[in-house]
Amino acid sequence: MDSENTQQNSGKLSRRDILAGLAAIPVFGAIGYGLFHHFAERRKKNVPLLDDIQSIIPKGIPPVVQGETIRLGIVGTGSRGRYLMKALGFLHPDRIDQFTLWAKDNKYWTEYLNDFYAQESLNVKITAICDVFEKNARRGAETGANAHRNGTGGKMDDPPKRFLTYQELVASPDVDAVIVATPDHLHVPVALEAVKFGKHVYCEKPLSWTIPETFEIRKAVKESGIVFQLGHQGRQTESYNIAKSLINKDVIGKISLIEVCTNRNDPNGAWVYDIDPEANEKTIDWKQFIGPAPWHEFSLERFFRWRCWWDYSTGLSGDLFTHEYDALNQILALGIPHSATASGGIYFYKDGRTVPDVLNMAFEYPDRDLTLLYSATLSSEKERGKVIMGHDAYMELDETLLVVADPKSTRYKEKIEKGIIEPHKPIFSYVPGQDKVDAITTPTEKYFAGRGLLYTYRDGKTFDTSHLHLREWLNCIRLNNGTQPSCDIDQSFEEAITAHMGTIAFLEGRRTYWDPDKEQII
Amino acid sequence: MEYSKGKLFTLVALRLLIGWHFFYEGMVKVFTPTWTSKAYLLDSGGFAKPFFEWIAQNPGLLAANDIINAWMLTLIGFFLILGFLVRPAAVAGMALLGLYYISHPPFPGIEYLFPSDGNYFIVNKTLVELGALAVVFAFPTSQRIGLERLLPKNRKID
């Protein structure tokens, strides 16, 4: 053993003690230099890219307007109709049983149920329902009775009255407002009938199945003064509001091209829905289903998979493109295009359908110096986002929002040269539910922002956009001062005309034009 | 415990390297108010995933977790470098590394969004650093090189 270590010194500290005791202090100096360097770099990159970014954050959810209970009639209580009932606060008791059971070992269902129970009451009563299929009508009525959100055996209210025809339903004095969740070819007939009786209307998208009825419903709604909302619940998507503010602040520069897509690859996504075993000629009012469509003998396929036939459907253009269009119309106020071209075909689902499963459409807006491209396939899930391409940056949109600078940007040239902005990497992101728009700075943030991980979870409450969309409609009804919801009849008209222009271009193999003076598709 | 000069040098170097790593990491986090472990926690895997996700999704817990983590890293690093309270610091450091390890265990079949800087099977750098801290704990050096030397009970004469 070393003698110097064996002898205890009860007295003073030696020089050697002090040196050895403080030997590691210089390490802090080295680390200090590292920290200084690190934060100097960060400061450089933290230069705000935009002032008053906080001002564009949506200011919460508007409260439910107080007033009388609104009595609703629902025409079409199939899957979409019942989804809207859920958004109103009504789930079938056996669905609640089922979800409660699933929630025991699956967190998704726990959250699903929690969100449902947390959903604010909209002070509505479902007093009437109508569906041409027995089972849908029965389940719709049972769902409508479950005002207290109970499982089987729980307290139920009186079930809504089942009407055999929509004409009888809309005429009922127990109905203040009507929700139309029928196949496309019946949207306008039902809505028109409701308007005739002065009932407010929430109509599923697209607005119309034919061009003449598009004009007819617009005229009727305008003359009646009822509150009309088209079911594009995307209107309630927060990131679209932020996108609009960012574009108004010229964050992405001059926009020349917008690309929107549909990418699906499963039978359900291609509208090949299951055929219910309870369905037959006795349980379906086929004549009423056909309505204004050309007569066809009874067909379960046509009844359940109506989206596959032009006889009842508006195809990819009316069914799916309209979601994309309405989002952009909300953000950019695009309006009806100058012209449209289209191509595509039935390339994968050769199952007797008449609507194409691949569709590409180009809409020209010469006044705005931009083209809107839509490209859809029902047989590949290759993710292609909603992208607004500007000279200075592109914006990718979904529920989330990313802005990525362009390497050749004029606006960001200096910042790119200084290394403040890295081109091809997101410079802004918006996380739904959060109360801030981030200027992304750290590599980890960049990595996750680019992959959407941060977006799968939301802080605080989650909201069903359909709930918010219905709520907006109901609020306008209660305000009763002429206020119309965000997707009013004018917005709906633009949506329908644009979709029809694309469809006609496809079906007739030609370019279609819109004459704004005569209000005609030529 | 007595060491040869070579052993002492190696052990002190190990203590300083780990201290450096902890201290720098902690200070960067402390001085970056916007830093959050949220994405890291959400990307966790393995049996404790629900626990870490629960923290990430609870704003109050997450904020507390971020502050505690940043300051623990800083203080552990500070004490390891300084050579003071090294044993408690080593234990705390091992606990912290243990949490990092179980939040992102490199087990077969678990995939993470954030790419790994190497290829690992059960053993990764976090676990190695945890082991190294165990060495720091088992073979104390701060009474020789470190502030603990200046405590009366540890004083040695030349």
Image: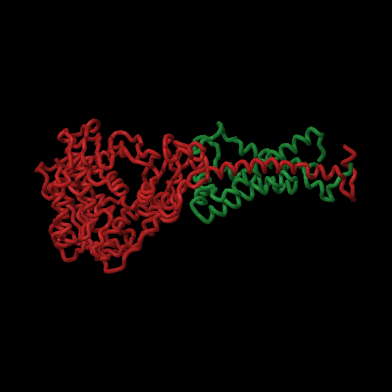
The image position of residue B71, as x and y in percent, is: 63, 50
Q: Is A335 or A304 nearer to us in this picture?
A: A335
Which chain is assigned red? A
Which chain is assigned green? B
- Residue A199, placed above or below residue A187: below
Quadrant where the image shows the C terminus of chain B: top right
Residue A300 appearing in the image? no
The image position of residue A116, as x and y in percent, is: 36, 56
Toward the left, the furthest residue is A295
- Residue A300, placed above or below residue A358: below
Is residue B117 left or right of A186 when viewed as pictured?
Answer: right
Residue at 70 percent across and 42 percent down: it is A29
Residue at 44 percent across and 45 percent down: it is A428
The image position of residue A56, as x and y in percent, is: 40, 53
Q: Is B75 or A132 nearer to us in this picture?
A: B75
Name the image colouring: by chain
Residue at 13 percent across and 52 percent down: it is A216
